[in-house]
Image: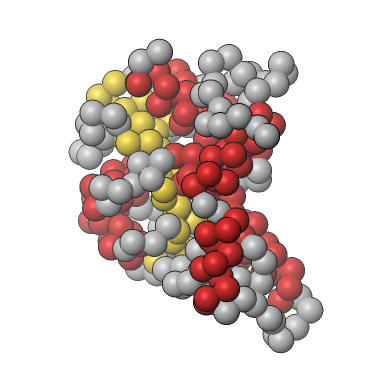
Amino acid sequence: MSDITEVRRLVATSSRILARHGQGDFIWGHSSARDPEDRGVWIKASGWGLDEITPARVHLVDRGGKVVDGEGAVQFEYPIHTEIMAARPDVGGVVHTHAPHAIALAAAGKELVPVSHAANYFVPPAVPRFTATADLIMTADLGRAVAECLGVASALFLVNHGIVTVGPDLPTATFAALLLEQAAEQQLRTMAFGDALHWSNPAESLAKREHIYNSTAIGKAWDYLVRTTVNTASSPAADGVPARISSPE
């Protein structure tokens, strides 16, 4: 199997995992993987929902917005992906969705705090908040502004819009998107009982991050997501999905 075949299947798998876990928004939202030859990003074609993505609906887009390989219309917000990857050589995967609880938490002006395990993946430091616009990120200048706001963080709130998560590979970025939405939902549920919240201190948060969300654990979590999302006889994406990263214990 070629690297290109594998990366297209990886983007399709990421898309379906995001949809299965409540981050679909009709035809909006997208995930991307860096091209193995660094020619751009592999991302779903515009006009399809996350739950509809197959490898054939994933194409290669360069930094100028040109389709280099594959078919279909280009996502308006491709600069989120291309500009972050240009600014962050360590990033191999980017996710942008309209995660509902994360949008609500950011719109309320609340910082994410570790009231549960999930938020420890991100905090400390604070998750950056992009407030320059709540409109679509359709230009290279806005994409660069998002990348600058993100800095070295693994996640970003696009206030009144959605989220961006990144990782050294697309499985990690996808898992981060699920964690950020889970953390936001858990915090909103806690806030419903009043403002007297209790959360882990920074030292404990960093320790929990290493214990719970190390690279080995994330790999096994990704394997679980693949097994439960696309490795079923009834799944339209079951044909040719990426192999598991590790064997379940």
Identity of the residue furthest to the front in this view: 249
Q: In this orientation, does residue 46 appear?
A: yes
Residue 197 x/y as whole percent: 69, 81
**Left or right: 145, with 190 as reference point:** left
Q: In this orientation, does residue 226 appear?
A: no
Residue 100 x/y as whole percent: 62, 56
Q: Is residue 147 above or below residue 170?
A: below
Q: Residue at x 36, y 15 (%)?
A: 2
Q: Residue at x 54, y 61 (%)?
A: 209
Residue 52 x/y as whole percent: 57, 27
Q: Residue at x 62, y 76 (%)?
A: 200
Q: Residue at x 29, y 29 (%)?
A: 36
Q: Closer to the camera, 220 or 181?
A: 220
**Left or right: 11, with 83 as reference point:** right
Q: Is residue 111 above or below residue 82?
A: below
Q: Quadrant of the N terminus?
A: top left
**Left or right: 136, with 205 as reference point:** left
Residue 126 x/y as whole percent: 46, 72
Q: Closer to the camera, 67 or 157?
A: 157
